[in-house]
Amino acid sequence: MLSLFRQICDLLVPRTCPVCGKQLSAHEQYLCTRCLAGLPLTRLHLHDFNAMEQLFAGKTPIERAAGCFWYERANRYSQILQSIKYRKMPALGEWLARQYGRDLAAAGFFEGIDAVIPIPLHSSKLARRGYNQSLYIARGLASAASLPVLDVVTAAKPHSSQTRKGNYARYLNVRGIFAIAHPEKLAGKHVLLVDDVVTTGATLLSCAEMLHAHVDGIKISLATLAVARLG
């Protein structure tokens, strides 16, 4: 019955793959089979002191870090992030994060982690966009690991877009923008901070620094859906 309903919906409003533009078949969800198979996976979670972990080394204590696929602005797979963030397709992020979360779980990545925390959006940006894409990604990862999602960190100050800023300018742009109302609730916990993409690491670094400064005994790991080439 569900398949028939989907076929009828696809006739009325065809679903297309955001990567290649091909119309999806009834059994395909969000991405076509070819594009899903060709997703440029990082497999960072399979390597000790991987490139993402090195990005934060010496800046703030991180237990482990990983991201699903490599992000390059000119690559067609960048359309996944564009669709999630700007084309009202956050469910794509949740679905893809759930698939990735199963790989992470199988590799033991979630071992010892108590909760998943999404990087928040400031209320002004949330009002414009209508949703926080990182929350959807966090839900996907958390469902694969059977972990709670704690929406406890807030973006207390607005900030401008990071897109055209250099590394240090990005860090200054997001420094001090995050806050937590009840830090005692996370005391001694190991949390997984989740964002949509890591480029310079400035946003995750700012949030991790805030948590280390205000929460006693906290441990932090990081996960993203996409990872920019880190050199």
Image: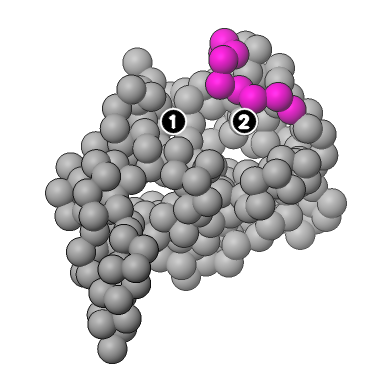
- Secondary structure of the magenta portion, mostly? loop
Q: Position of residue 124 (x, y in %)?
A: 78, 41
Q: Quadrant of the N terminus?
A: bottom left
Q: Along the line of sight, which residue is nearer the eye, 66 or 112?
A: 66
**Label whose residue precedes the other's in the sequence (2 or 1):** 1
The colour scheme of the drawn protein is one colour
Q: Which residues are magenta?
A: 159-167
> How far apart are the two marked residues, 2 and 1, measured between alpha carbons?
15 Å
Q: Left or right of 143: which side holds 8?
A: left
- The reply to whether the magenta stretch includes residue 95 is no
Q: Can you name the residue that lies furthest to the front here? A: 12
Q: Is residue 157 left or right of residue 94?
A: right
Disc 1 element:
helix
Q: Residue at x 24, y 59 (%)?
A: 24
Name of the residue lying farthest toward the bottom = 1
- What residue lies at 53% left-to-right and 56% top-to-bottom? 136
Q: Is residue 53 above or below residue 142?
A: above
Give the residue number, with chain letter if any, for mark 2: 203
Question: Looking at the image, is mark 2 or mark 1 nearer the viewer?
Answer: 2
- The kind of residue tagged 2 is Thr
Report x, y in % for residue 9: 34, 72
Question: Within the image, what quadrant is residue 75 found in?
Answer: top left
Kindly identify which residue carries mark 1: 53
* Residue 145 shows up from this direction: no
Between residues 13 and 168, which one lies in front from this camera angle? Answer: 13
Where is residue 152 shown, x and y percent of the image?
Answer: 73, 55
Residue 144 at what x, y percent from top left? 40, 65
